[in-house]
Image (tube, rainbow, N blue to C red):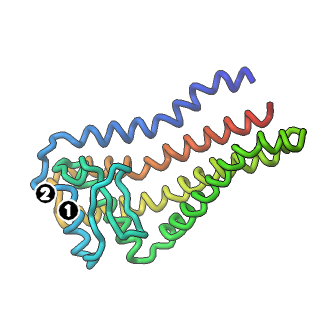
Amino acid sequence: MRLLILLAPLLLLLAWAPGLWVRHVMKKYHQPADRYDGTGAELARDLLDRHGLHKVRVETTTKGDHYDPDARTVRLSEENHDGHSLTAVTVAAHEVGHAIQHAEGYAPLRMRSYLVCVAGYGQQIGAWLLVAIPFITILARHPAPAILFLLAGVLSMGLAALVHFITLPTELDASFRRAMPMLRDGKYLHPPDYPHAERILKAAAYTYLSQSLMSLLNIASWFRYLRR
């Protein structure tokens, strides 16, 4: 127990560090804000059209940059959609990479989409279980079986961790097998910017590593609670 208390700050640092690094990198290369003539949205549109994906839309979002395979839409934050920075155009290329994966039937992306759907239902069931357990305990006049707590934790947090881990290879593929070659082949960036674009693409991919670590930390906290 004493060892766990000593290790807790280190575990928190390991979980938070990737996320802090991602935010630092993205913010750093948002300057200068007028680095490129075109916006992130304009670059995304050009790349999509070059790959024959004329029906894929490009929109702004308040929910973070992502590609929506169901709506066939590249969604960019307002800062990246309308921005002219290195971050804006690089993130746009990354999300177009996901659209190309979808068009090619890239298996890991299909698996991720399926798991996201399953995880969504699982999290709902887990949340309902957490609400229902106190009532089950009252009605049964006996503490709810530990298996119910375990099931609720797995459904609520375990599936999320699995989705984040499965997502990481998909993100790396979108960054370095799709986005970076597109940017290089099209000579979209100023020559000195390519190494910096690689850092941004790593940050875009490792966003999910940060989320995975946080999910694992949540699961560890849950199991520690069950052992009490």
**Residue 189, image x, y percentages:** 17, 56
Q: Position of residue 145 (x, y in %)?
A: 85, 44
For the C terminus, the image quarter is top right
- Residue 149 relative to residue 71: left or right: right
Tag 2 residue: 38
Residue at (30% x, 43% y) in the render: 26
Q: Disc 1 marks which residue?
A: 43
On the picture, is 165 further left or further right than 147? left
The reply, left or right, for residue 207 in relation to residue 42 is: right
x and y percentages locating residue 86 in the rendered image: 21, 49
Q: Is residue 5 above or below residue 101?
A: above
Please report the residue visible at 19 percent of the width from the left and 47 percent of the height from the top. Answer: 85
Q: Position of residue 1 (x, y in %)?
A: 75, 24
Dot 1 crowding, Cα within 10 Å, few <14, some 14–19, many 20+: many
- Per the image, label 2 sits on a secondary structure element best described as loop
Q: Assess whether mark 1 and mark 2 are in contact (beta carbons under 8 angstroms).
A: yes
Which amino acid type corresponds to the residue marked 1 in the rendered image? Leu
Badge 1 element: helix
Distance, label 2 to label 1, CA atoms, is: 7 Å
Furthest residue toward right: 141
Above/below status of 78 relative to 49: above
Front in this rendered view, residue 218 or 135: 135
Outermost residue, front side: 139
Q: Quadrant of residue 12?
A: top right
Vertical position of residue 12 compared to residue 189: above or below:
above
Label disc, if present, on residue 224 of the rendered structure: none
Tag 2: amino acid: Gly
**Viewer-closest of 90 and 183:** 90
Could you say which is closer to the camera, residue 118 or residue 39?
118
Q: Earlier in the sequence, mark 2 or mark 1?
A: 2
Q: Residue at x 41, y 52 (%)?
A: 205
